Image (tube, rainbow, N blue to C red):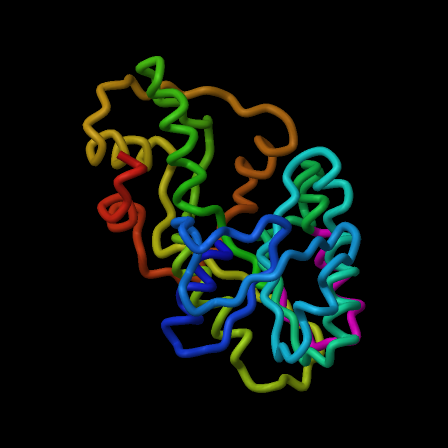
Amino acid sequence: MGREVVRLALDAGLDVIVLSRRPPSGTSPVHHDGARYFRADVTTSAGLAEALQGADVVIDCLEGQFGKARKNFADGGARLLAAAAGAGVRKAVLLSIINCDRSNAAFYVSKADKERVYALSALETVVVRATQFHSLVTAVFQAGAKVRLIPVFKGARFQTISPSDVASELLAEALGEPSAERHRTRTIGGPDIRTMRELAGIWRKATGHAGRIVEVPLPGEMGKYLRNGLNLVPSQRTGTDTFESWLAKREDSL
C-alpha cells in the first residue's frame, strides 16, 4: 500500500518522503525515482524528527501483523504523531480496516487501538477504513491451489478493493482542505459484493487452475466477523477496479 501511495503522489508531482526501517536501494524494484528515503523506526522514534522536517502531511500505511510488531503497533503510531507534531506537520492520514473496533481478533484490536491514538492527536487526522484487498482472497486461493484445492469460507462474502483505489483515497484525504472536524473516520469499499465461492470461480477461470473449490468453516473471531457481514459497506462502493480487472493486470496472481 505504501508503494502505491508513493507512486500516485509522485505522478501528481508532489515532493515525497518515505520512512522505512529498511529503505530500498536505488536498484530495488520497490524504489521510486523522485522520492527521498529516510531510515526511521516508529518503535524507537529513531530518525523520525529528521525525516519529518518540512513535511505537510503524513500518510501512515505501517503494518504490524504479528508478535512484537502488533503489540507495539498503537504505540508506534503515537510516536509518529508526536514527531509529526514537533515538525509542524498539519495533518495525518491513517490506513485502517473496516469495523476493526467490532472484532476481538488480535490484529483488528491493534488497528482499533491505533485509531484511538489518532483520535487523541494534536494534529488534524483522518482514518480511512478499507474493506479487504483483492490480494487477501487471492492469497487464500493460491495457498490451497498448491494441493489442487481452492478453499472458500462458509457463509463469507467480500467487498474486495484494489490497493490502487485505496491509495487514491488516502492521497485525496491528505491533499484535502482543512476540516472543521479535527478527527474524522470514513469507510471505503470495493465496487462489488460477492460470495467467496463466486470469487474463487472468477480466480480459477482467470488463472486456469484446475483445483476443486471446497467450502470450509472459519472458526473464531474472524469467522464471526465475516459471517456477520462486518467486512461489507454496501453504501460506500468507492473502488472502481473490480476483482476481475485487478486479476487481469497482475501476473503474480495467475
Report the residue that reaches farthest toward the top: 147
Q: Name the residue at 62% across, 85% down.
A: 178
Quadrant in which the C terminus is drawn? top left
Q: Is residue 124 magenta?
A: yes
Residue 226, above or below 153: below
Find residue 200 and report its image quarter. Answer: top left
Q: Tell whether 168 sits left or right of 74.
A: left
Residue 235 seen from this side: no
**Residue 101, horizontal then vertical, whole percent:** 69, 50
> Is residue 52 left or right of 191 when viewed as pictured?
right
Q: Nearer the viewer, residue 35 or 127?
A: 35
Please count the marks in the image: 0
Q: Is residue 16 above or below residue 240?
A: below
The residue lying at 27 percent from left, 18 percent from top is: 211
Picture quarter containing residue 64?
Answer: top right
Q: Give the magenta-colored segment's residue range.
A: 112-127
Q: Is residue 218 magenta?
A: no
Q: Is residue 40 shown above or below 221?
A: below
Q: Point out residue 181 in the picture as x, y percentages from the top left corner.
A: 68, 80
**At 60% across and 54% down in the image, what residue appears?**
20
